Image: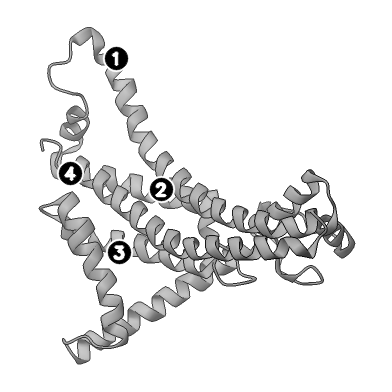
Amino acid sequence: MIDSTSTQVIVDSLITTKPASSSDWILHHVMDGDYLDFSPFFKVYLPQFELFGVDLSITRHVLFMWLGSILLFIVMTRVAKAYKSSMVPKGFTNFWELFIIFVRDEIAKPTIGKGFEKFLPYLLTAFFFILFGNFLGLIPFSATFTSNIAVTATMAIFTFLVIQYGGMRNNGAFGYFKGLIPHGVPVFLLPIMIVVELLGLLAKPFALAIRLFANMTAGHIVIYALISLIFVMQSVGWAGLAIPMALFIYGLEVLVALLQAYIFTMLSSLFIGMAVHQDH
């Protein structure tokens, strides 16, 4: 968490020509904080408290994660109620059904195969949770909680647990771990292969967490870096170059927001399918 600074320090960081100060200004906006930052001169500080020595302070990433969860609950509740009253989707329901069918038919079914229905609720939850978080982060003065490594790591851990559950449920605990070792491996290589396969199990959620975190952070850093050129060069003339480029990257961020939700869900589904159907 970045400690709050005085208004004067923030203003100085905007107009200074020192690269270090410029990077501090970028990190100030990208990373988590204990306040909502509406401008260099106006902030709303969030509640800070501890329970039994554990810091349970509310940060802007936590606040927007709650907001994303509430919006997701409201949207999906409305969609579910629409299906109860009419089996023919239209309007609002039809829009969200496109995403639901896409996850079902283009992600879960092809990658998991038989029995994919058991894992579809988790994959849909992960997809929409990431999607809402990514798009909330594109709103001015908001925060992208999917660019927080703690959030992406927690989601990756959930995927890891679902992978192990699916593998052991379909193959049995012994059969699942036995299936991780390739057939025909010489006995003297078994200790090495066991270590390699265990590292492979851990590498999958690690890759999921880092991929989502890095991609959602990188886009925001590029946008702020382009805007900071105006202040670093201390010339309004740079706005003619910096602002159109920043808007172009912002447009790409809309695509990245969709793409990263898809990639996380696709890889999670693929890993689950590999664990469930080890013989294929």
Please tell me whether residue 248 is drawn above or below residue 180 in the rendered image.
below
Residue tagged by mark 4?
276
Q: CA distance from mark 4 to mark 3?
A: 18 Å
Residue type indicated by callout 1: Pro
What distance separates the C-alpha of mark 1 from that of mark 2?
Answer: 27 Å
Q: Position of residue 117 (x, y in %)?
A: 17, 61
Q: Residue at 16% of width from left, 57% of height from top?
A: 109
The tag earlier along the polypeptide, 4 or 3, is: 3
| SS of the residue under disc 3 | helix
Asked if one can make out residue 119 in the rendered structure from this viewpoint, the answer is: no
The residue indicated by pointer 2 is: 156
Compare marks 2 and 3 and give the one earlier in the sequence.
3
- As drawn, the label of residue 124 is 3
CA separation in Å, label 2 and label 3: 15 Å
Q: Are marks 3 and 1 in contact (CB under 8 Å)?
A: no
Distance from Cα at disc 4 to Cα at disc 1: 24 Å
| Mark seen at residue 114 | none
Q: Is residue 270 left or right of residue 31?
A: left
Tag on residue 191? 1
Q: Secondary structure at mark 1?
A: helix
Q: Is residue 262 left or right of residue 1?
A: left
Q: Amino acid at mark 2?
A: Ala
Q: Amino acid at mark 4?
A: Val
Q: Looking at the picture, how far across and down is residue 90, in whole percent?
A: 24, 88
| Camera-nearest label, 1 or 2 | 2
Q: Nearer the observer, disc 4 or disc 3?
A: 3
On the question of residue 144 being in view, the answer is yes
